[in-house]
Amino acid sequence: MFVLFDSYRYNFFLRKIDKKQEEYEVHKKLNPKSMKTENKKMVLRYLIESGPHSRVEIARKTGLAQSAIWRIIEELVNEGLVEEKGTATGRRRKAVTYGPTRSFITSIIYNVEVLETLVAVGFLDGAWRIIERFSTPKDFDEFKQRVASSYENILKNHVLNENISKVVFSLPGIVNTENKFLIHAPNLGWRDVDFHKEFGNLDLEVLVENDSNLSLLAEEFFSQDVKESDVAFFLYFGEGIGGAISVNGKIVRGENFAAGEIGHVVLDVKSGKEVEEFLSISRLIEKIEKFVELQGESLNEKFRYVKRLWFSGEKNVKETMEEFLQHVAVVLKNIVYFLNPGVIVLGGVVNDLWDTFGSFIKRELEKITDKEISAVLIRDTIFKEISPSLVGGNVLAIEEFLGQII
């Protein structure tokens, strides 16, 4: 099944018009060759993020001359990056629309979670398709075997572009992205894993990133409010709890790649308990299963059943959930005061926490936070039916490619 956020592409366009004009002023200061390259990147990025458009529409949105757009589109078509997608009705006649090609895959994504690994392929237009899923082995050698098997199957059934296609691993731990090295994933029991070495036999370049960072990268790519925010934060709910920070559109990884790792922040000084102890979805489920048998196999399925019990007024579930949500409010307060972000996005294994419990969390937050400060925008991720880190895996591959265009 293909998944493509067409509804967001138009509404969450790449840049505000004034931002485009600022970029264009910078372009004018570059030498002609560099300016052509930057213009080409801008046009391709626009089509990736906003979907198919006619050349006239592209010229109007980017501020580039129509002659430049005609030349750039012709180049992109000849390079196999853009193709005709259909027609758009104009004032006088129908105009051909152009969009990113789906003739090859940009990424093979391994979205690793503690219980399950999703395998997907991504495309240049931002879409993706889930290929398979398997239980994540605790033994890394067994994990390598599962990756090798799925990789071979994907090669048999999909077209690659050796200059563009990447293998991306989304991991629930601290990752040295430069060296493609997993420092530590405590919930997996993996430590000091050199992904470049372990998967060097694959034909494609390997990229490795933390799941929270990839989730925020996906939001940065598709969501206008995150684009416009000087500071944004993604609070990732999963088997553990993670976080990611962006400043001026750039993911902040920190000196040792641990920036945003809010799960390790101590909430209770006496006991030394960390945020993860209170906000981990898997630990929440464990608490509730002590007195209620939950339906479902995955954490997401069990959490959906918890919501039903909450709304039905089940006493023990309600008390446990209220304690959980109060801790969510405390963590949000800490994020608000420490980073003062313009937007905080919630998501991960559970992607509707704010939609479901936002009114309760907001009341708790207002009790412990100055009114002006608590007015920060808090919302769920736009990716409702899939882990946002999987989407971010494809975005990472696209960003790598865009950065290499010359």
Image (cartoon, rainbow, N blue to C red):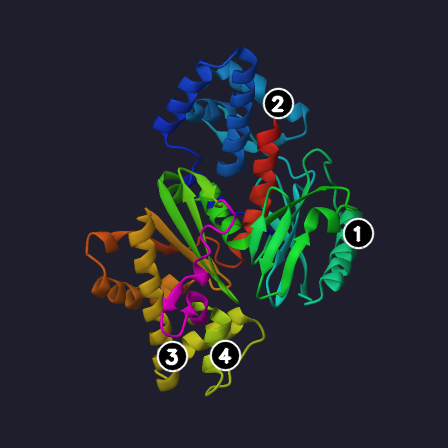
Q: Which residue is mark 4?
A: 286
Give the residue type that dot 2 points to.
Ile
Give the CA distance from mark 2 to mark 1: 31 Å
Q: Looking at the image, tell me whether mark 3 or mark 1 is earlier in sequence order.
A: 1
Q: Looking at the image, tell me whether mark 4 or mark 1 is earlier in sequence order.
A: 1
Q: Position of residue 175 (x, y in %)?
A: 58, 51
Between marks 3 and 1 in the image, the one whose residue lies nearer the viewer: 3
The structure residue drawn at horizontal position 24% and vertical position 66%, both measured from the top left corner, is: 363
Circle 4/circle 3 CB separation < 8 Å: no
Secondary element at image label 1: helix
Q: Which residue is mark 1?
A: 152
What range is drawn magenta here? 255-277
Q: In the depicted view, which residue is nearer to us: 193 or 89?
A: 193
The structure residue drawn at horizontal position 59% and vertical position 60%, both measured from the top left corner, is: 185
Q: Position of residue 5 (x, y in %)?
A: 50, 47
Looking at this view, name the residue that lies furthest to the bottom.
Answer: 291
Q: In the depicted view, which residue is nearer to us: 283 or 191?
A: 191
